[in-house]
Image (cartoon, coloured by chain):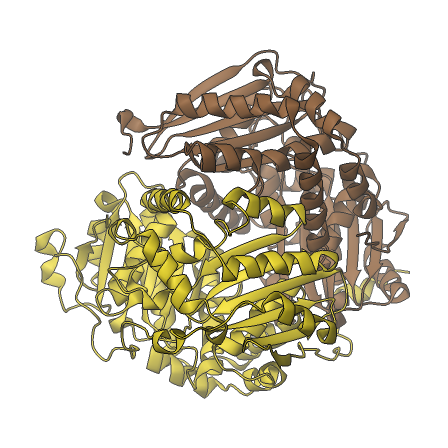
Amino acid sequence: MMVHIPFERYEMQNGLRVVLSRDTSAPVVAVNLWYNVGSRNEKPGRTGFAHLFEHMMFQGSENVPEMAHFSLIENAGGSLNGSTWLDRTNYFETLPAHYLELGLWLEADRLGWLLPAMTQAKLDNQRDVVKNERRWRVDNQPYGDWDERLQMLMYPSDHPYHHSVIGSMEDLDASSLEDVEEFFRTYYAPNNAVLSIVGDFEIDHAKSLIDRYFSAIPSGPAIPPIPGRTQLGLSLGGEQRVTVEQDISLPRLYVGYRTPAYGTPEFYTNAVVAQILGYGKAALLYRTLIREQRLAQDVVAYAFPIVVGASMLVLWATALPGVALDDLERAFHAQIDALQSVESRDVIRAVSLIEARHLSDLQTVGERADQLSMYTTLFDDPARINTEVDRIRAVTVEDVRAFAARYLIAGNRSVMHYVPKHGEVAS
Amino acid sequence: MSDEKARVMPPVPGEPPELRSPSVQRFQLANGLRVLVVEQPGLPIVDVQLVIRTGAVCDGEANAGHTSLAVDMLDEGTPGRSAIEVAESIEDLGASLSMAASWDDSALGLHVHTDQLEPALGLMADIVIRPTMPAADFERKKQQRLTAILQEKEEPRALASQAFNAVVFGGTHAYGSPLHGTRASIERMTRDDAVAYHHSFVRPGNSFLVVVGDISATALVPLLDRVFADWTDGASVAASVATPVAAPVAPPVAAPVAPPRGPWPPSASTFAGAGVSAGVHIVDRPGSAQSELRAGCIGVPRSSPDYFPIVVLNTLLGGSFTSRLNLNLRQDKGYTYGAGSSFVMRLDAGPFIVSTAVDTAVTDDAVRQILAEITRLREETVPADELLRAQSYIALGLPRSFETTADVASHVAELEVYGLGDDYFDSYVRRIRAVTAADVMRVAKQYLNPRHMNVVVAGDAAKIAEPMRALGIGTVYNKAIEE
């Protein structure tokens, strides 16, 4: 089953870390940059700013006119995007192989020379776009604010994960051009970034292009520490419960457990646990709550790959019409408790499914480049693209049982009940 | 060394690499099943698609969703395995097996490591040949489907899209009903209907198989012959090959179907017939944080001789980030997170649809801008550089469509379903490049007439009904949320 992704990694004098991986099976190339900054780095009163800033990175730079970033890449038949998350911001494009240089030129220009192109009009425009993004993702979606509410319950108010990536409307309104400049000067520097290239290119040629476009960008000052409290005990220290009334017809249960951060050995057990509980039709919660007991419409389980202090295992289940949320919750906890005597067959199946998913992810150059950037940014170790699977394989049935006994307990969880407004329950 | 001058202008691209489109090999099994194989060396992964050429278009309004629920039942048990055991057996192989109906066909998809291909194919064949569809499992799946339909009534995107389809196709074609059914149509369905679908349509003579991955066709075909040996057409299939319940629809020459609900409120009828659209339909969501907008009309079938000009036209209007709708509504006005359009091409003419979600306060102007952009493409010649950009985006982006085995399998299945020919991708780039500005204007005039278009808004009627009336583009109707 072993697949080995070859790569070469080096660091430029300005601190930019570079990972190159050649694969000529398709005439395409992926250019991917991770900046080691996310919503966790936002200061009080500026929630959502890291993401708003990401939008500003697409509005042109000194030599790239407004809209040209998009039009040059689409002109070349490429796809592009960026995304912001708690721990990072990434920017990426997949291009026909002969347009590699274009991608590097565009990325270098905005890393080195963004500010000359910034204007109040661009900021006002993208602020409106982002506010509409929030309406679309959160405010106009049933249960749309669940992650925002759960993060508030799971992390203390002085922890950087206490607030959501999308941020509040008020904080978005308060953002200024000065914030853009300060954020850029603080976090957008080669010494806070990783550049990965994967696809059909010659290694030496890529190196010379990277040198041509990135070496003139000076290193920035030392990156300030993540604000607020970044150390957390590995227990919530008591169950927390909230009830949220919304315009929904089906109640939904959300449960979060505090778990060890991404990168720790126990995180891989957490990933296996999420798989056992919630992925696929043979998963424990699917089998019991959906198939056998017919209490739930759906179940989801997810181990957050986040690194500051502690991660969380998040699960949810939507009640079928006529099912009381308390009954669903009771049945849910019974299955979580049963995990303490899970059978090895369930663990083996979960491991093989995670392995299979990992292999499938590697089919696109874009995903490979993103993983190389991620492992280099978070762990300074691009080789994890090949070794991470070993950490999953090492998880044993005893590990899963011990993990459940230690972390998946009442005193370490937050529970949210989403219920219909005015007691309207569908029958 | 860095070269300061080098960074002022965008670099010139190198030599374009040769386009390698999938090379399809065709076989036929002893039972008559046609097989299309693409050998794609690389990661040890295989994607298999079994396509059944009877899709949801055969359901009709009264039985909407029956095909899709029947297909959903295929993996709910075989003679040797309960539903749970089927799921466990697949997942023990690290494989994933999915099934879904679309309008034109139904498909089972298997994604598996090459090492596990043989046992996984065995399971797939068992499901295809001998599904038991236990009554209790059918009742559970039916209840889940009814619940999903209930959930959609509070999901603004689904609400707007379904209302759009109902307005554009309602009463004339199956496309007007939700593919997965309505509460009434699903409540009407029995396990016998699912069994009948399988009996009538899941036959080798009504199906074909696509296999893509790190495999050799010569080794694969004997394996497939063995695995599918028990699958036969039987006597009934010739008589039961599906025909759609409605005749194919042509683009309308006058305003399409009458809106299904009365004017809202009745005084709005002063605008009837005076507008530049066929009508505005508001799905009321009191307190909605945004307006989900849809606008469009009946488009074209996949077999349209104007396929290539239409693809270019749509790319200019709403098929990419730098398309006119997104540049106008997002980058210029900041009304939305994104706006786009598509011609959904099926065996029959599917919809042409513009989709976006905008701030409630600008709903009226967003609609005005959408209609203006459509009109501009009809009346003004598209500039040469913009046309070239759209063509390059499509033509140069083609290799990205063939990166994964699943993507290749989907494209190969399309070749077969729509009869495009195995050399289709070889001439694709040339045909995209051949489209002229005059072609674009011609197809815009032919297929995009604002007077034939309906506008659907899922949003807060108390705030948007009056501005939409004042816009003067046509009668404003209240579109009730269907049961």
* As drawn, A171 above or below B208: above
Evaluate whether residue A295 shows in this view.
yes
Residue B442 or residue A64, whichever sits in front: B442
**Residue that appears at 41% across and 83% down:** B304
Give coordinates of residue A14: x percent, y percent.
87, 46
Residue B473 or residue A149, whichever sits in front: A149
Evaluate whether residue A303 shows in this view.
no
Q: How many marks?
A: 0
| In-image side of A166 versus A104 (left or right) | left
**Quadrant in the rendering for residue B199:** bottom left
**Residue that appears at 28% across and 56% down:** B163
| In-image side of A338 versus A395 (left or right) | left
| In-image side of B283 versus B205 (left or right) | left
Give coordinates of residue A26: x percent, y percent.
74, 69
The image quadrant where one finds the C terminus of chain A is top left
Give coordinates of residue A328: x percent, y percent.
43, 26
**Residue that appears at 76% across and 33% down:** A395
Q: Colour of chain B?
A: yellow
Q: Colour of chain A?
A: brown
Q: Quick one: which residue is furthest to the top in this view?
A: A237
**Residue that appears at 58% across and 83% down:** B424
Give coordinates of residue B260: x percent, y percent.
17, 60
* As drawn, A107 above or below B30: above
